[in-house]
Image: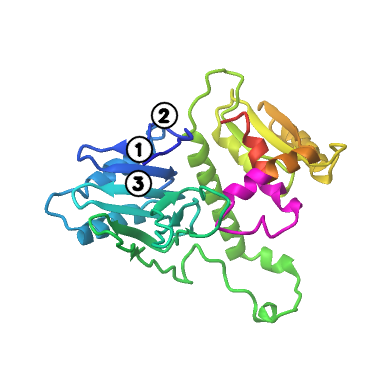
Amino acid sequence: MVSAVLHLRGTQLCEQPVHDRHGNVLLWNGEVFGGASIPIYESDTKYVSHRLASVDDDSVSAEVAATLVVDALSMIQGPFAFAWLHVSTNTLFYGRDGLGRRSLVVHTPDDAKRSCFLLASVALNSQRDGWEEVACTGVFSLDLNMLGALPRLHPWPVRVVSVASPRCLPPLPPSVVALGTSFDADPFCDHADMMLAAKGLLQVLSAAVAKRVESIPTQEHADSARVGVLFSGGLDSVVLAALCHLHVLPTEPIDLLAICFDKDHNSPDRRAATASWTELKHLFPTRQWHFVAIDIASHQVDTHQPHMLVVEPPTSDLSSSEPPAVVEPLALFESTSGFC
């Protein structure tokens, strides 16, 4: 079991694989934002390992262990993919959160080719044969005591949200439900329930941003930003940047990472980003906003496309499309280069 770690939380990097006191082994690719009480600067990897260690008991069967693993992980709020080797039953548990927000792919054995059972964040070669995305419907278990055993699914518990829940918006007027019907949004937006829902959304979004940025490790250099926002200048990125301002220490800078593929570095997004940067400086003059212009030439797209096609299987969104389809992942790749 091998893992590479991107340090996002905790005062010290937590090396992986993680071995607990019982000898169980954890690979964790995720972030715990809720559902558990973890101090801001504590490693969530260590927390998950400790929580899974409570499953261990020499008398526990693999079936009971599976139930306990599902119970332990289903309470976690946040994106994750994991693999956990339970030593006492010689069982491998693995899976993703219910929304599938972290990549995990599996290669099952093929008798004809005598290949192995493999788990990875991305496919290990450009060949799609044999690789499948792990379903996010629950935890899978593989009995390593039986040669040729097939994985078993242990579903996540079903949690139903009532339409009467305060987290749900009020129903649209019947006239709006009909396809193709237009309506005046102002009276609906001024509705007390809508205003309450909008306020609730802002509060929840602000709390989510706070959880994300407050746990980021401190940088060695005082003038280095801990937080960077992918910044197109659109409403979503401006709101996120403003919320970051509320939860990052006043003395710390915030990086605004603006990507541009235009050869003249003057695309509509770049102009919008520049204008929004000016507005943020006006609204929050005490904050040091670093505008980081990231200009990507067309030859860089051509250079990185083969690599992206290799790590992209088993899906085929990029390989079945024209070269511009790599622009979005390339923007993320380039914006994080030098920051990790």
* Quarter of image, res 199: bottom right
- Which amino acid type is marked by label 2? Leu
Residue to which mark 2 is pinned: 13
Q: Which residues are magenta?
A: 306-329
Foreground of the two, 180 or 46: 46
What SS does tag 3 mark?
Answer: loop
Q: How is the image coloured?
A: rainbow
Mark 3 is surrounded, within 10 Å at the Cα level, by few (under 14), some (14 to 19) or many (20 or more) other residues, namely few
Mark 1 is surrounded, within 10 Å at the Cα level, by few (under 14), some (14 to 19) or many (20 or more) other residues, namely some
Q: Answer with mark 1 or mark 3, whichever residue precedes in sequence.
A: 1
The verdict on residue 214 being magenta is: no
* Quarter of image, res 148: bottom left
Check the image and report above or below for 297 versus 202. Answer: above
Spatial CA span between label 1 and label 2? 12 Å
Q: Quadrant of the C terminus?
A: top right
- Which amino acid type is marked by label 3? Ala
What SS does tag 2 mark?
Answer: loop
Q: Residue at x 49, y 32 (%)?
A: 216
- Per the rendering, the mark at residue 36 is 3
* Quarter of image, res 271: top right
- Which amino acid type is marked by label 1? Pro
Q: Quadrant of the N terminus?
A: top left
